[in-house]
Structure formats: C-alpha cells, structure tokens
Image: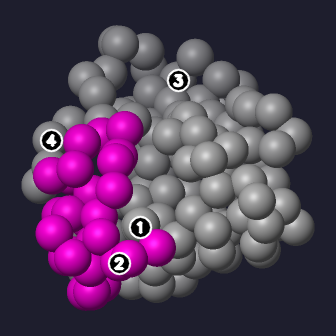
Amino acid sequence: MYQDSFESPIGPVTISSQDGESICEIAFAEPDGYPSCNVTSKGKQQLIEYFNRQRQQFDLPLTPAGTEFQQRVWKQLATLEYGQLASYKDIAVAIGNPKGNRAVGMANGRNPIAIVVPCHRVIGADGSITGYTGGIEKKAFLLRHEGAAFFE
C-alpha cells in the first residue's frame, strides 16, 4: 500500500494506491502512514492544483474497487465536466437504467475516489444539494469552488 496526503481547504485528503501504478482511493481522511509512490504524488499534485484553481481535469490512472454496476456509474460520473451538475436520474438514464435512481445514489455514495470521480456534482432533481459521504459542507464547498449553481 502507498499513500500521500495533504491538508486541503476542507480538511485532510489522502490518496492511496495498492500497486504503486494506479489510484484506488482518494478520501477525506488522515493517512495511515504508508510510504508514497509516483502515482500518489502525482495525485496529490493534481489535487493541490485543483484546489488552487489551476486544474479542472485530472489525468490519473484509477482502479476503484466495486461491482460492475458501480463501475458503470463511476465511469459516467467521470464524464461530468468541472462545474457541471447532474441528477441521480440523469446518471441512471445515461447508463441505460432509467428507473435506477436509488441504485445510482447508492453507487454514488460508495465512490472510493473523491473529487477525481466527481460524485459531488450529483444533486437532487430539484437542484438541491443532497448527501455526500464527506459531508454536505464539503460538497457545498466543492460545488462553490467550481462555480456550480445549486440550492442550499
């Protein structure tokens, strides 16, 4: 296991890799004390650039662990551009499961790669901010940071 971390404007962020080749997790958490590697250092650098408004897209190898359905949801989330919002229904329709709003919500909540796989860009159908594993305050910060319009 490899990790890198930094203090972001919304608290500690830790980037993890199982194999030193790809990122398996980005979490709002303190590191566990593992050494860093090239890919975790690259993830840290890109996230710092994001918080400094110097980056809107990420270029990182990712290997999130999840079911086939979760992988489809996360892949669709990754198509959302900086500041672009979508509803759970939008994501469900995009992956070919138009009645799968709740399942999309559950997959969204299990996303292990915060920010880079932008589950924070998913809001309620009425434009309201909805739950976020990192907490509503973090989600609101990220959306404001990206200039997204939503109801609080």
| Residue 124 magenta-highlighted | no
Q: Residue at x 72, y 31 (%)?
A: 65
Q: Secondary structure at mark 3?
A: strand
- For the magenta stretch, what is the residue range? 125-152
10 Å crowding of disc 1: few (<14), some (14-19), many (20+): many
Query: According to the image, what is the colour scheme of the structure?
Result: one colour
Q: Which residue is mark 4?
A: 11
**Residue 100 can be seen in this image:** yes
Q: Secondary structure at mark 4?
A: strand
The mark nearer the N terminus, 3 or 1, is 3
Q: Residue at x 30, y 70 (%)?
A: 128
The mark nearer the N terminus, 3 or 2, is 3
Q: Secondary structure at mark 1?
A: strand
Q: Is residue 78 above or below residue 137?
A: below
For this rendering, which residue is in front, 111 or 105? 105
Q: Which residue is mark 1?
A: 123
Q: Which residue is mark 3?
A: 2
Task: Give the image location of residue 30, x and y in percent.
Answer: 25, 23
